[in-house]
Amino acid sequence: MKLLILGCGYTGQRLAQHLIDKNIPVHITNRQGEPILGLKVPTFVFAHDPQTSILPPADAYAGVTHILSTIPPNAQGADPVLQDLLPTLETLPLQWFGYLSTTGVYGDTQGAWVDETSPLRTQVVRSHHRVQAENLFLRSALPTHIFRLPGIYGPGRSIFERLRAGTAQNILKPGHVFSRIHVDDIVQTLWQSMQQPHPSSIYNVADDLPSEPSTLILEAAHLLGIDPTPPISYDSAQMSAMAQSFWQECRRVSNLKIKTELGIKLLYPSYREGLQAIKAAENRKNP
Ligand SMILES: NC(=O)c1ccc[n+]([C@@H]2O[C@H](COP(=O)([O-])OP(=O)(O)OC[C@H]3O[C@@H](n4cnc5c(N)ncnc54)[C@H](OP(=O)(O)O)[C@@H]3O)[C@@H](O)[C@H]2O)c1
């Protein structure tokens, strides 16, 4: 087995380390082709640009049996991998291809649960582009597995950073919940799927407890031993266009399929276990 990770950002790096720890060879790409601190793996450039992409060299694919793409659609809505690499990837003897998508494809369900068979009713252009990318990957000759993700958090990327920087807004919108997932539960799901390929499968990768963001802020502030940010009403909150689009949708994401089909036991069933583990690891680093 050899894994190529196209776009080795936050999730890609955690997955790469997981495989390196199992002595499985990994190749990665990023836009600069720069090695990533602490990851001793061959690193190649893949920099998609609608006019002048820089493509990975043939060496990047040598011996590769599994590929994960974590690269989002470009500003025009096209998927970089489909646009630049699909004909090459389709010539490889791949056992598994994974694509990281978003649970945004389901749109707003006013808090109702969604599973992988739920209709895709997004009204957000960005999420329409994801639906298109998913469909094109599923229709390709690749052994495609789609992973729909809600908000990703984990070490170095959680509410703790925003609380410490004083940028966390404690927005109150009663009943408005978000699903989320710890990065290491994405990693274990990807790994398990590689062991048990089911081409053309779609998986939601979410934790067990969709919850209001304000409850998360209370828990995180408690763990940091600081006062939570004062609450503000949803109507008076200052938000980016991206954040507004998130708050316009409310859904609960079911994770039953990863448990039944892949046998996943979540490491972090809710934000509580996830935040506690991140804080405990920080304490071990800086006692
Ligand atoms: N963050 C969330 O909460 C969330 C929620 C749902 C879904 N998702 C999606 O899940 C996936 C993984 O998330 P993540 O947070 O791990 O992503 P990330 O850290 O942003 O990593 C994305 C990777 O894609 C590469 N990339 C971006 N544009 C590219 C282009 N034009 N050409 C070539 N490579 C390009 C980046 O290259 P560089 O390393 O050179 O920057 C990076 O390695 C993404 O598709 C993300 O949109 C994220």
Image (spheres, rainbow, N blue to C red):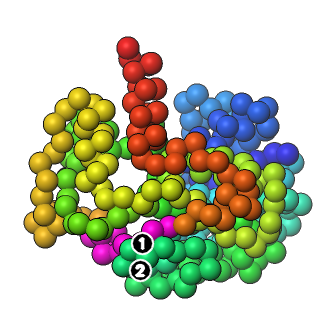
Q: Nearer the viewer, residue 50 or 255?
A: 255
**Residue drawn where x is 67% and y is 57% of the image:** 259
Q: Quadrant of residue 197?
A: bottom right
Residue type highlighted by circle 1: Arg
Residue type highlighted by circle 2: Thr
Which element carries disc 2, helix, strand or loop?
loop
Q: Position of residue 141 (x, y in %)?
A: 81, 75
Mark 2 highlights which residue? 109
**Residue drawn where x is 85% and y is 45% of the image:** 1
Q: Residue furthest top?
A: 287
Asked if residue 33 can be seen in this view, the reply is: no
Q: Position of residue 140 (x, y in %)?
A: 76, 77
Q: Residues within 10 Å of mark 2 (few under 14, many from 20)?
A: some
Q: Nearer the viewer, residue 186 or 262?
A: 262
Which element carries disc 1, helix, strand or loop?
loop
Circle count: 2
Tell me the tag on residue 251.
Answer: 1
Label 2–label 1 contact, CB within 8 A:
yes
**Residue drawn where x is 76% and y is 48% of the image:** 3
101 to the left or right of 20: left
Write the start and end of the magenta stretch as one range.
Answer: 244-253
**Residue drawn where x is 38% and y is 44% of the image:** 158
Asked if residue 204 can be seen in this view, the reply is: yes
Tell me the tag on residue 274.
Answer: none
Magenta highlight on residue 38? no
Residue 230 vertical position relative to residue 22 in the rendered view, above or below:
below
